[in-house]
Image (tube, helix red, strand yellow):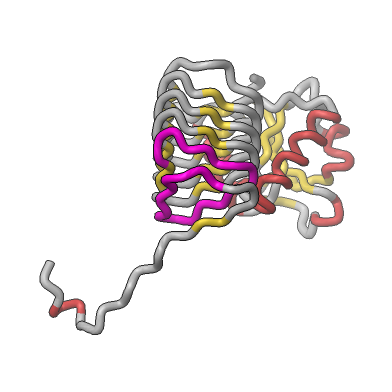
Amino acid sequence: MRDRAIIFGDQVFAETIRLDLDMAGIQICAFCVDEAYRHRDSVGGLPLVSFETVQDSYPPDQFDAYVGVGYSRMGEIRMDAMRRLAEKGYDLPNFIAPTATVLPGPAMGRGNLILPRAFIGREVSIGSGNVILPMAHIAHNNVLGDGNFISTSAMICGFAQVSNNCFIGANSCVRDKIRLAPYTLVGGHAYIDRDTRPHGAYAAPRAVELAKDSLDVAL
């Protein structure tokens, strides 16, 4: 892992990743996107350069690369960016925020982003290109594939399997020993207690508004 890097992406998530990396002592020197999507010259005071020519100014033998792309198209865009950066010769290290907890387990893949206060239990296998947001909790003996997005405060109980390109929403819970098939979408607050189907989408019931003034509700 080098102390200088570039970020693929130019939206809010990319800027958030920049702050996390900066606080961990990794200097972000530029952002990049495909030229067709480059509609400005800078992001947060840093250059925004074309992906097609990024290696000319930020050569891969001197800079690492991180992908600051969220859950667009269930992680496909993030994984494609990783592939293309690797083809240019960039290293895509894992980033584990200093305040995250990662207990001993099998070796990780590459390009994972484990953000502040996330918790990874013991004997968890993690592939590549996963994003694990703050306060997500991944319990023991789980298996994560590639390209998954685990939202804030999501809970994955023990011995579960998360395939590839899944989205697990904020405050959701995946029960122990459950298998999420590829491209499973778990909405916020949803509880998954059975195996899912490929490309399945699961949502929790919405809150019901009471026909009362809030001051009249006994707390």
> In the picture, which quadrant includes the C terminus?
bottom left
Residue 88 location (% of width, % of height): 85, 30
Would residue 59 be found to the left or right of residue 4 on screen? right
> In the picture, which quadrant includes the N terminus?
top right
Q: Is residue 117 visible?
A: no
The residue positioned farthest toward the left in the image shown:
218
Residue at the location (60% across, 36% down)?
Answer: 163
Would residue 179 be found to the left or right of residue 99 on screen? right
* Viewer-proximal residue among 121 and 142: 142
Residue 189 location (% of width, % of height): 40, 55
Residue at the location (21% across, 83% down)?
Answer: 212
* Viewer-proximal residue among 2 and 88: 88
Would residue 39 be found to the left or right of residue 195 on screen? right
Q: Is residue 114 magenta?
A: no
* Viewer-proximal residue among 58 and 79: 79
Residue at the location (71% across, 35% down)?
Answer: 6
Would residue 77 be found to the left or right of residue 184 on screen? right
* Viewer-proximal residue among 202 and 47: 202
Q: Tell me if residue 114 comes above or below residue 74 in the rendering.
A: above
Secondary structure mostly seen in the magenta stretch? loop
Q: Is residue 6 visible?
A: yes
Magenta segment: 175-196
Residue at the location (76% across, 40% down)?
Answer: 81
Q: Is residue 190 magenta?
A: yes
Q: Tell me if residue 36 comes above or below residue 132 in the rendering.
A: below
Residue 84 location (% of width, % of height): 82, 36
